[in-house]
Image (cartoon, rainbow, N blue to C red):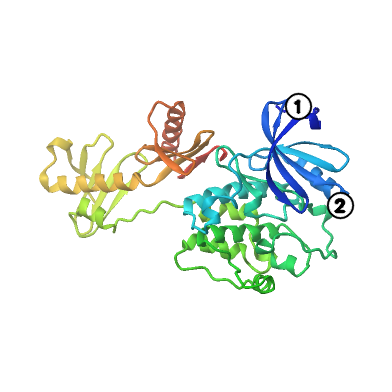
């Protein structure tokens, strides 16, 4: 825990300048009291509105969220006010090599970045604040490569929004049409900026490119953009919703985070050529039903017999009226049934291997358990196989067991808060 009472200039050793703007400069510094690196924003008093600076400090100091840069305190001298905050060692999204080179981010990369940003916006909106300057330069990567939102110089409280005030501020690429038209701001301004960033990451350029700032503003005010066909249709849908020209028709940040883009469904494609090669269907038409009890039912069109594959891997041959004709152990199963039963078991295993039944958000990352009880860990956009040595695994399996034995299980089950 930082000692916030000791914010004096002599407690900090300035090491390097890491940014500069119209307000002044930003420095990396070492906090000699708390023994850690910090970021110090130096604001020139003479060229800055004191009311605006006080508002920035008031808003930033009231925020406390994992995806927002921590505020530590301030100190002043004759010429400057210094805002001391958390240092993020991996720079901004704007400074990242991939962004600077206009490279296209993968869906998983974009999803991770925008999910962190969305949570920061959600927290601010729930506290009735608008950030009003969301852009890649204000999105910093911490030591774990999670996004933290910074720079609250243009932020405002909804209770302070004046419908008759006609200020235009922000960065042109990300400014909402209503702001360009000098109308009242709202939470929807941040949603527009969110949509622009999502577009930029997935397309590799801005949605409103033009030869002049005037033309760019005109395109933005008329929402004149197009999404290339290579963009994932689910992502394109979210972009279109966020870049709706009318603020009232844009989704809230809660709706954005509930969008399918952030909750992708696994694809099970049994028409995949490789899958066809592995599994040759031994019948022309029928259904395979996998029950939560572990029982499989194979019902083939045109046949009077239904095969029930029990959890102990024995097989019942049942008439349609429910009468049991025969009961076989697997090793004694006649050949005419064996091919069909093996296919049913294999097809269900392949399906289960792709369908999550439990998602557990944990400090280590996101754990996903599939129907075949295999577990993988998503951390820093990379998937890892997980063995049974982790203590979390037993509790996950216990929960799955309880839910599977309930009368009406609903999958997938999501537990915990994402980190």
Q: Is residue 52 left or right of residue 319?
A: right
Q: Which mark is residue 3?
A: 1
Q: Is residue 59 above or below residue 13?
A: below
**How far across and down, in percent of the image, does residue 105 sit?**
49, 55
Circle 1 crowding by C-alpha within 10 Å: few under 14, some 14–19, many from 20 = few
Closer to the eye: label 2 or 1: 2
User: Could one spot residue 21 in this view of the protein?
Assistant: yes
Which residue sits at x=74%, y=59%?
Answer: 186
Residue lying furthest left = 335
Which residue sits at x=41%, y=33%?
Answer: 401
Q: Which mark is residue 322?
A: none
Which residue sits at x=25%, y=34%?
Answer: 312
- As helix, strand or loop, the secondary structure at mark 2 comes to loop
Along the viewing direction, whichever of 183 and 44 lies nearer the viewer: 44
Q: Kindly indicate whether the residue at mark 1 contacts the one at mark 2 (C-beta within 8 angstroms).
A: no
**How far across and down, in percent of the image, does residue 126 sit?**
71, 48
Along the viewing direction, whichever of 102 and 346 lies nearer the viewer: 102
Residue bearing mark 2? 49
Q: Is residue 3 left or right of residue 342?
A: right
User: Could one spot residue 408 in this view of the protein?
Assistant: no
- As helix, strand or loop, the secondary structure at mark 1 comes to loop
Q: Is residue 51 left or right of residue 39?
A: right
Circle 2 crowding by C-alpha within 10 Å: few under 14, some 14–19, many from 20 = few
Which residue sits at x=81%, y=63%?
Answer: 167
């Amino acid at each position: 825990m930082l000692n916030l009472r000791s914010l004096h200039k002599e407690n900090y050793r300035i090491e390097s300048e890491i940014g500069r703007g119209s307000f002044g400069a930003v420095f990396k510094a070492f906090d000699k009291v708390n023994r850690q690196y910090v970021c110090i924003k130096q604001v020139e008093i003479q060229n800055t509105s004191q009311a605006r600076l006080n508002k920035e400090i008031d808003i930033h100091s009231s925020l406390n969220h994992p995806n927002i840069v921590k505020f530590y305190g301030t100190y002043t001298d004759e010429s400057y006010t210094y805002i001391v905050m958390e240092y993020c060692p991996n720079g901004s999204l704007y400074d990242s090599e991939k962004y600077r080179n206009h490279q296209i981010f993968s869906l998983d990369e974009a999803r991770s970045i925008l999910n962190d940003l969305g949570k920061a916006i959600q927290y601010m909106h729930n506290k009735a604040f608008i950030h009003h300057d969301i852009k890649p330069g204000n999105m910093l990567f911490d030591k774990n490569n999670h996004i933290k939102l910074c720079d609250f110089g243009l932020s405002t409280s909804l209770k302070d929004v004046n419908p008759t005030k006609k200020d235009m501020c922000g960065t042109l690429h990300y400014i909402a049409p209503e702001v360009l038209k000098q109308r009242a701001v709202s939470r929807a301004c941040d949603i527009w900026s969110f949509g622009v960033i999502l577009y930029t990451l997935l397309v590799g350029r801005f949605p409103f490119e033009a030869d002049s700032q005037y033309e760019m503003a005109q395109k933005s005010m008329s929402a004149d953009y197009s999404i290339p066909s290579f963009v994932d249709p689910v992502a394109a849908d979210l972009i279109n919703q966020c870049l709706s020209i009318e603020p009232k028709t844009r989704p809230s940040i809660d709706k954005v985070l509930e969008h399918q883009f952030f909750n992708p469904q696994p694809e099970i494609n049994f028409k995949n050529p490789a899958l066809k090669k592995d599994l040759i269907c031994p019948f022309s038409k029928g259904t395979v039903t996998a029950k939560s009890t572990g029982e499989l039912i194979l019902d083939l069109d045109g046949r009077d017999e239904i095969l029930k594959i029990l959890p102990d891997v024995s097989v019942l041959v049942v008439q349609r009226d429910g009468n049991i004709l025969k009961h076989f152990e697997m090793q004694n199963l006649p050949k005419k049934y064996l091919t069909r039963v093996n296919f049913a078991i294999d097809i269900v295993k392949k399906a289960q291997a792709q369908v999550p039944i439990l998602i557990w958000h944990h400090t280590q990352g996101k754990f996903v358990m599939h129907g075949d009880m295999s577990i993988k860990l998503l951390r820093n956009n990379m998937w890892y196989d997980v063995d049974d040595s982790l203590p979390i695994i037993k509790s996950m399996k216990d929960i799955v067991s309880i839910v599977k034995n309930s009368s009406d299980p609903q999958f997938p089950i999501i537990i915990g808060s994402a980190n």
